Image (cartoon, rainbow, N blue to C red):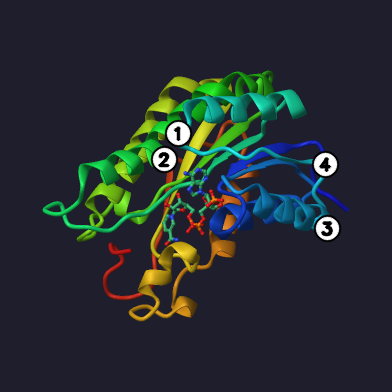
Amino acid sequence: MSEQTNRSALVTGASRGIGAAIAERLAADGWDLTISARGREALEAKAAELRELGAGRVEVVPADMTDTDAVTALGAAHGEAFGRCDALVINAGMGSKGAVAEMPVKRFDRLYQVNVRAPYILLQSVLPTLRSTAAGHGAAKVIAVASITGVYPEPELSAYGATKAALISLCETFNLEESEDGVSATTIAPGYVATDMTDWLKDRIPKEEMITAAVVAVVAHSVTQLSRYAVLPNVVLTRPGTNLHRA
Ligand SMILES: NC(=O)c1ccc[n+]([C@@H]2O[C@H](COP(=O)([O-])OP(=O)(O)OC[C@H]3O[C@@H](n4cnc5c(N)ncnc54)[C@H](OP(=O)(O)O)[C@@H]3O)[C@@H](O)[C@H]2O)c1
């Protein structure tokens, strides 16, 4: 039996990894979903899985986060399909490693486009739907997947960390502007999560010792349970050990 059949979420980067895990957790509660990423085929396969898990309607809207028009259209498509947005999950993101001394500025620009600029556009595009969903005594949540590197610096992740710090700052300001009207944002700032993005690290940190995408999904799901009167600005999710301030 689904918990909330008529709630709906837009999840970016939902074809695999953390975004897929969040979509799966919401599907298990019967949510309606718009899922997005670049690759249509992987999204269609994921949509079929989500329906099996118990999702209501699932819309597939491919969009490249570097494409302004596509990101704007994605937000509009969700509003048109469902007429409400209880959770906007800003998860699509890219990583890149390199010391400040060596990082090509072009790569920095791309990180900024995907990890900060696209979330900004998406917030603007979905905001009218979030506001109308929260009207009265309702609540609408923005859940943005940042990174622990946006809170505590990590060598060779300066550009990535800077984009995630910017995302956290953006959501903090968003809360100042919107939270009294029931729309609030939570950033989740995890250390290393066992997904494709951390494949490069697996010889140093075994995947089974990383945070799982399912655990991040539990945190995201919890945020969707909060009323409009509870604002959770940022959740740092770290790995055990003697240094809790590292990825
Ligand atoms: N894994 C970690 O250790 C970790 C830790 C902290 C934070 N994060 C953050 O968590 C989020 C998800 O990461 P993940 O580990 O789940 O990564 P992942 O497994 O590589 O998945 C990334 C998802 O984003 C989509 N995507 C990538 N580039 C895109 C673009 N330009 N436009 C649209 N969609 C795009 C991918 O699909 P397509 O390739 O088909 O587009 C895929 O669905 C990211 O924001 C990441 O920075 C990850």
Q: Which mark is residue 5?
A: 4
Tell me the residue that label 3 is attached to. Answer: 52
**Residue beneath disc 1:** 118
Report the Cα–Cα distance between label 4 and label 2. Answer: 31 Å
Earlier along the polypeptide chain: callout 1 or callout 3? Answer: 3
Is the CB of the residue bearing disc 1 within 8 angstroms of ligand 1? yes
Separation of disc 1 and disc 3 at Cα?
30 Å
Residue at figure coordinates x 40%, y 65% from the top left: 192
Q: Earlier in the sequence, mark 4 or mark 3?
A: 4
> CB under 8 Å between callouts 2 and 1?
yes
Q: In this rendering, does residue 70 appear at all?
A: yes
Q: Which mark is residue 114?
A: 2
The answer to whether residue 131 is left or right of residue 110 is right
Q: How much space separates mark 4 and mark 1, taking CA atoms?
A: 29 Å
Q: Position of residue 4 (x, y in %)?
A: 79, 42
**Under tag 3, what secondary structure?**
helix
